[in-house]
Amino acid sequence: MMQKPQMNRRNFLKASAMTGAAVIGENLLRGGTQLAFGSKGNEIKAPTEKIPLTMEADVVVVGGGPGGFAAALRAARMGASTILIEKYDMPGGVHTSGLQGAYNAGVGGIHTELMQRFDKEGHVYTATEKTFPDWAGNPLSHYEWGLKPGSSFTRKTFNPEGGGSVMLAMLEEAGVKALYNNIFVDVKMKKLSKKETAIEAVVVKNAAGLQAIKGKIFIDGSGTAEVVARAGAPFVRGGGPQPPPVSLDKQNRPLPGGLLWTMGGVDFEEVSKYQKSQNDPTLSKLIAAALAAGDIPPDLFRPRLEGKCVYGNLYIGHPTLDMNPIEGPGGFILWENVPYEWALHIDDDAKDEVRAKTALRRFIDVEGRFLKKYVPGFQNAFITNIGRYLGIRDGRHPIGEYVLSIDDALNSRTFPDAVTKPMTKNFHWDCYKTHTFQVPYRCFLPQKVNNLLLTGASMSFSYETIFMVMRNFPWCTQTGEIAGFAAGSSIKQGIGPKELKWTEPLF
């Protein structure tokens, strides 16, 4: 690991000669230095600090979730020198560090390759109606609750830790310089014109302190458009208008994030026997008994809203156990959602983030004890893991050269710069109705910054559109590959992403 150079002239020049390092000056961080000479009011006066420029690459990707992972992989495979910055100890985001482990049928390109690697290396677990005869249509099921009881189904999950190792290996094989346990802090911008700027370097914090990384093209794989915000590109804060009958006082709240956790030693056959014999499919009798005894707080299991679809039975409220088989027999993943009524902006408010993470840890502890004490089939269960990544379903929405709206999807619009062939999706917002549409390349290009590309949940989509199916694993991986392809093509042509002529779908 590179040691942080001593900041006198002789040692710095020596370090620069050995590593190619340079120094970026005092304006690199907007208010972001470590030591203070004094304070006034609600501000701290800080001394000038120079930050060592330790690395440089053609393409710099911030965030190693499915989007950032695929972007870095594709760019590197096209011959671009590529650096990936990831705050956790492996790539994969909510699906690895966050434990979700959702295995999907391959949709082409890197996503298909990745699913095949998961399967080949023995990380995939498959649940069907044969292994879980009472799972389809069960209200405790996160995915199969809407099926008719007894229906056939196949639900595959991958081991999050094993999956993260596969993704890490693929990046290494492609020659990506992946920087794990590096936290993105800020950007150094340069002006190009009155209307356009460019990112010169990003600042990260790691064991050596603050360091700067220079690049030609940057990709926002943060999942919350954090690079967009730091770069000064326009965006809309999370949250948005909600359809009737949601009352006006409940509008403009972000869709709540969630923390995932896993339990082992669960006997689901015994759980289903209880549900049937006691006519208690949602465990409401057991929840009521635990509430009366003071064993659980009233905000643990909350009723759903009065709306439909997104604002009825999806993520809004948490009235009962929410679980899915994962990893192997007896293993389950469980969802713990932030109370919607708290209206927390976890992506951009430090107090909200702390409140959410603290509360969800408390909920998990309480729910785990409730399950063991009250629910047959859980008496021998134990918590095996809690995600170190709190999934954010509704963060900043960048304003790009084109903003894909709900009308585009509902009217099946096509575009000359479409990145895929017409896609058919079931929309949560529209009560699962199917629509066919395309996404233009311009949705990958934020306004005002000419060398930044977007991916995944940080795409230039409207609030209603991004929530649907435009932030799942397959789509985020596809958008990452598209962004990586755009970056690699731009590097080869010696142009910026906004100058790239996109004429054919990649998928």
Image (cartoon, grey):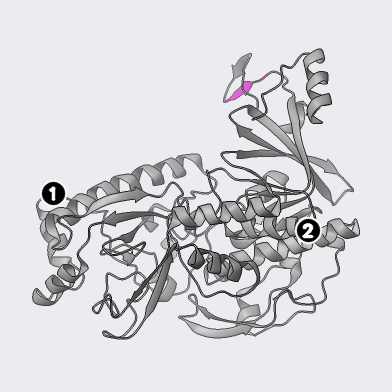
Q: Quadrant of residue 319?
A: bottom left
Marks 2 and 1, the one that precedes in the sequence: 1
- Rendered position, 428 above or below 286: below
Task: Identify which residue is drawn at 62% across, 33% down.
Answer: 205
| Horizontal arrangement in the rendering, residue 188 relative to residue 289 (left or right) | right
Q: Is residue 496 magenta?
A: no
| Horizontal arrangement in the rendering, residue 38 relative to residue 194 (left or right) | left
Q: How many marks?
A: 2
Q: Amino acid at mark 2?
A: Ala
Q: What percent of the width, then of the height, locates residue 503?
A: 83, 76
Foreground of the two, 359 or 214: 214
What residue range appears in magenta? 42-46
Task: Identify which residue is drawn at 81% across, 14% down.
Answer: 9
Chief secondary structure of the magenta portion: strand
* Mark 2: secondary structure: helix
For label 1, the crowd category at 10 Å Cα-Cα, with few meaning under 14, some 14 to 19 and many 20 or more, is few
Residue matched to label 2: 487
Task: Identify which residue is drawn at 46% across, 44% down.
Answer: 353
Residue matched to label 1: 294
| Horizontal arrangement in the rendering, residue 170 relative to residue 453 (left or right) | left
| Horizontal arrangement in the rendering, residue 18 relative to residue 265 (left or right) | right
For label 2, the crowd category at 10 Å Cα-Cα, with few meaning under 14, some 14 to 19 and many 20 or more, is many
Task: Identify which residue is drawn at 75% across, 69% down.
Answer: 441
Q: What percent of the width, then of the height, locates residue 58?
A: 80, 48
Quadrant in which the C terminus appears: bottom right
Q: What percent of the width, then of the height, locates residue 396?
A: 59, 55
